[in-house]
Amino acid sequence: MILHVPHGSRALTAHARERILLDDAALSGELDHMTDAHTGLIATRAAKGADLAPWMFSNRLSRLVIDPERFPDEREEMRAVGMGAVYLCTSHGARLRAEDPDHVEDLLARHYRPYAAAMAALVDARVAATGHAVILDLHSYPSRALPYELHATGDRPAICLGVDSFHTPGWLREAAVEAFSCFDDLGVNTPFAGSYVPLKHHQQAKAVMALMIEIRRDLYMAEPGGAPGEGITAVVHAITNLVDAVVTTGRRR
């Protein structure tokens, strides 16, 4: 059982910051829009409340350095808006970085590939120890679509569950629906779809299972980048219940 928090940090390396074209005020605004604020806090509270604490894997850098969940090549559909594994554009379509293939490759080598290797190693260790690994991929998203979104016309429920036909078994989807049944507004694969697994295991290993949890931000925080609110308690409770359900089911398998 792994809780994955890929987009919760606002931290930038000096090397990455010096190539970003935004001034400090504009950069702060972009981080407000693009950071999944407080998801690390949610994951930590859920892990502490679980009967058996899950493993946690968190990105310590902002997704404006690299986005570990994007494909690093032509498979990534977000390249169409300049937001592949290394973002060239902002959430509103402005230029974030100059188009410099050498700089992109440098960021991939410094950050993307080591992150992918470390996550894959953790997954391999869990599969070796237990026979399987379950990744809960924790995100948040704004109540109103940002210009970069390719599927902005989809419903924006309070909770979006991202499932994958290969990596999300029926029992995991059902456990998630049950855990989040306290929320009246629950969607599957809208406005975001699928879930993250390391490239090493993607569409290869059935023993690696995954489900994405997208929390609409107005449910638990002041948008776009404000403090958490009272709603965070219900979110933590639901995720804790899901972790416990997954561990219980895993023991029976």
Image: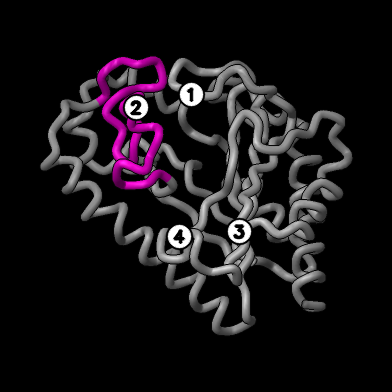
Image quadrant where one finds the N terminus: bottom right
For disc 2, the marked residue is 80
Q: Which mark is residue 128?
A: none
- What segment is highlighted magenta in the picture? 70-96
Judging depth in this view, the residue of 165 and 63 nearest the camera is 165
Residue at the bottom extreme, as displayed? 129
Instruction: Give the residue at x 64% y 52%.
Output: 211
Mark sitting on residue 150: 1
Q: Which mark is residue 167?
A: 3
Are the two marked residues, 1 and 4, in contact with CB atoms closer than 8 angstroms? Answer: no
Q: Is residue 176 above or below residue 94?
A: below
Which-is-in-front pick, marks 1 and 4? 1
Q: Which amino acid, mark 1?
A: Leu
Q: CA distance from mark 1 to mark 4?
A: 23 Å
* Of pointers 3 and 2, the one earlier in the residue sequence: 2
**Badge 3 local density, few (<14 within 10 Å), some, or many (20+)?**
many
Which residue is at a point 16% across and 48% down the rendered structure image? Answer: 106
The type of residue carrying mark 4 is Pro
Badge 2 vs badge 1, beta-carbon distance below 8 Å: yes
Dot 2 or dot 1: first in sequence order is 2
